[in-house]
Image (tube, grey):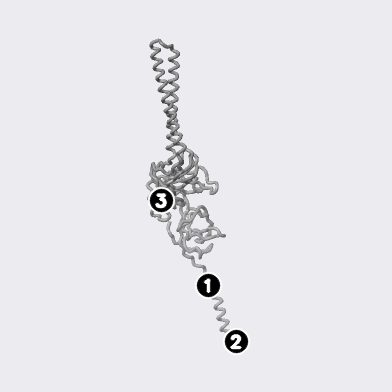
Amino acid sequence: MTTVACKVAPLLCAALMLTACGKEEAEMPEKPRPVKVLRVLPTDVADIIAQTGEIQPHTETDLGFRVNGRIVSRTADVGARVSAGETIAVLDSSDIANEVRAAEADLESASAAETAARSTLDRQRSLFDKQVVAKPALETADAEWRSAASRREAAEANLENARNKLGYTKLVAVDAGVVTAIGANAGQVVGAGQMVVRVASDGAKDAVFNVSERLISGASEDIPVRVALTSDPAVNVLGSVREISPAADPVTRTYRVRVALPGAPKAMTLGATVSGTVEIPGGKVMVVPALAITSRSSSPAVFVVDTATSKLALKSVVVARYTDTSAVIQSGLAVGDEVVVAGVSKLRPDQAVKLEEAGQ
């Protein structure tokens, strides 16, 4: 027994020593953890808003005939370029040509009747001067001449209308441009005013966007818009809002906004996809690095240092939006709060820390 006791005694002593050392380590205070902090201050930050749209012509015109008829030919197709005064389509003009001939005959007859009435009036006036006929005969001849002259004027107007209608059988481009749509083909009977060809005029171009009501109400019409090709952002131009639709689209509930693009590059062809960027003043907000954001009950939060105790507190915040490197805080922070900006995943509330300023 004495031999066993001598062997066990050293083991018990060693265990007691280890237990004592563990109690001493547990009772030692935790060293403050160095953390980088940022003292948050109100900052003026603008809302940068980007929308996708397309290039459309500044002026697009629906061309149609001014008279009814059957199309006998149409020379322009979608994508074709037309010049001002160029004939795009032609109606069957046989019926209107007959109207012209009939009007010419009516004018010839009315002119002959007027000439005869004028001769009768001159003869009656001569006889009246010689006191051969009474005054009522002269007045009758004068009335007949005036009536004949009126019929001749009406015949001239009818002939002019008929000739105009004959000219209307040719559909002519008003301005130079590109055909963007076709409304009727050769052989089709069309009514006056029906769209046959749609032409986008050369020259000025617009960028067209569908914008939500929130953005419409928060921006002024004179705000500049930077428009760039999505395929090549280096091709861009500064535009201005030209038109905002007065009513929302019944399906998408968005408003159509047209942005005038003075001096638009040639690369911005009709139908090209573009992005429009505007800056809307957002007022005073708090901005912290994105790395400072952690979570609390699945909501955004940040660690703030209590300068009185040098311990951490976890504050819930409302993030207005994120950028590539930062978070814009809408609420939850006070001016001058010391926010931890790095290593937040390894921190815990009430942890003692030592400050290292990250900047103002």
Labels 1, 2: front one:
1
Which of labels 3 and 1 is toward the front?
Answer: 3
Q: Nearer the viewer, residue 212 or 331?
A: 212
Q: Which residue is label 1 attached to? A: 25
- Amino acid bearing label 1: Glu
Q: What amino acid does circle 3 point to?
A: Thr
**Which mark sits nearer the N-terminus, 3 or 1?**
1
Indicate which disc residue 269 carries: 3
Of the 4 image quadrants, the one containing the N terminus is bottom right
Q: Earlier in the sequence, mark 2 or mark 3?
A: 2
Q: Position of residue 161 (x, y in %)?
A: 44, 33
* Residue drawn 50% across the image and 63% down it: 344
> Which is nearer the eye, 130 or 54?
130
Tell me if label 3 and label 1 are in contact, CB under 8 Å: no
Cα–Cα gap, marks 2 and 3: 100 Å
Residues under numbered marks 1 and 2 in contact, where contact means CB atoms less than 8 Å apart: no
Could you tell me if residue 8 is visible in this image? yes
Give the CA separation, mark 3 to mark 1. Answer: 75 Å
Label at residue 42: none
Q: Position of residue 249 (x, y in %)?
A: 53, 46
| Coordinates of residue 59 in the picture (x, y in percent) | 43, 43
Q: State left or right for residue 235 relative to residue 22.
A: left
First in sequence: mark 1 vs mark 2:
2
Q: Which residue is mark 2?
A: 5
Q: Secondary structure at mark 2?
A: helix
- Mark 3: few, some, or many residues within 10 Å (few <14, many ≥20)? some
